[in-house]
Image: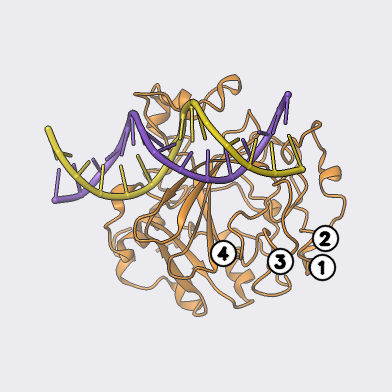
Chain colours: A orange, B purple, C yellow
Amino acid sequence: MSGEGDKPDPDFAAASAWDLRHHPADNSFFYATDDYKESTILSEFGWNIPPDSGGASNRHCDFADFPPIEPVLAPSRADDRVAPDAIASRMVEASPSNPSVSSSSSDDPQEKSPSAAAANPPPESAGKTKKKGQKRIRQPRFAFVTKSEVDHLEDGYRWRKYGQKAVKNSPFPRSYYRCTNSKCMVKKRIERSFEDPSVVITTYEGQHSHYSVGYPRGGMVTQEAAFPTYLTPSSNNSPHLPYHPRLPHPPPSPLQPAAGSSGGGEPRAPPGEGLLGDIVPPRMRNNGS
DNA sequence: CGCCTTTGACCAGCGC
DNA sequence: GCGCTGGTCAAAGGCG
């Protein structure tokens, strides 16, 4: 990372239309843009965003084509006061080739601690993760910056809100959600950017341990049932019928923030709302400096 | 009745 | 050691 913070990343320089956004509360970085060439740029990040997505404010992406989710940004609070440039440098470290990053998962030494069972417990104990005296561990995290009027974006999974906190330096509270699947430990945080209230920052943590969407009342729902209408990336102008993420076979897949889906997600989402739009990938590619 | 959100309290980690 | 902040728990209430 040395030196990365004081000179522009070639990729960043090329992507002049990108707007660096720093999420101070979590110390995460995002690149947001309205330029359609982002798809090309995103591909370099390992994200496959459909080029034609019907407008910057209602964009979807095909997460199913994503490579295995890589760890992320979001260093701990300890870095809160680090200058943005320095943080950007840390992001470079947050790559597979730099497992030293705190957010790394599989090789996180903390997983060997007793608390590992708490944060990554066996299925039968999922849901009751935190006990007094047990240490928290960080699952791999990554975030999306989306432009949406609603905070909670449909992503194909069902979530249960378990907390809300006021965020320092932000007038908007942060909401904490947990996957309702008892075997799934995935969490996500949702908050609005204090810089741009129209921007929703969704941070996923962990990997879904189940294949499809959640389990709506009445039993498990298959993907086909959950997504009766399949919209291709190029035809997803309708906000009512989100693009169906193509889930890989077989499961489980890496944490996949299935783009806009409504089936097993929240009970409902107002038409035109709650869909992942204007998605911006976290910068987690090693820029190979 | 079951699931969900809300909300205050509690805990852990970190900086000073 | 203290204070701050993020993250989580769990009870209570609401809703379909």
Residue A53 in picture, x, y percent from top left: 72, 70
The N terminus of chain A appears in which quarter of the rendering?
Answer: bottom left
Quarter the C terminus of chain A occupies: bottom left
In this picture, residue A237 sits left or right of residue A58? right
Q: Is residue A36 left or right of residue A261?
A: left
Disc 1 is attached to a residue of which chain?
A
Residue hosting label 4: A280
Residue wearing tag 2: A231
Q: Amino acid at mark 4?
A: Val
Asked where in the image residue A144 lies, by quadrant, the reply is: bottom right
Marks 4/2: CA–CA distance: 20 Å
Q: Say if A264 sits above or below A167 in the image.
A: above
Q: For this rendering, which residue is in front, A124 or A20?
A: A124
Give the mark toward the camera: 4 or 3. Answer: 4
Judging by the rendered image, the residue that carries numbered circle 1 is A235
Q: Of marks 4 and 1, which one's residue comes earlier in the chain?
A: 1
Callout 2 amino acid: Leu
Q: Is the C-beta separation of discs 4 and 3 under 8 Å?
A: no
Q: Nearer the viewer, residue A268 or A144?
A: A268
Q: Determine if residue A88 is in view.
A: yes
Residue A237: x and y in percent read: 78, 69
Q: Secondary structure at mark 1?
A: helix
- From the viewer's perspective, is residue A191 above or below residue A225? below
Q: Is residue A286 above or below residue C1?
A: below
Element under label 4?
loop
Task: Kindly indicate whether the residues beneath marks 4 and 1 are on one polypeptide chain.
Answer: yes
Could you tell which of marks 4 and 2 lies nearer the N-terminus? 2
Q: CA distance from mark 3 to mark 1?
A: 10 Å
Asked whether disc 4 touches disc 1, contact meaning CB atoms under 8 Å apart, the reply is no
- Identified at 70% across, 58% down, the residue is A62
Q: Secondary structure at mark 3?
A: loop
- Write the residue at 40% across / 21% down: A114
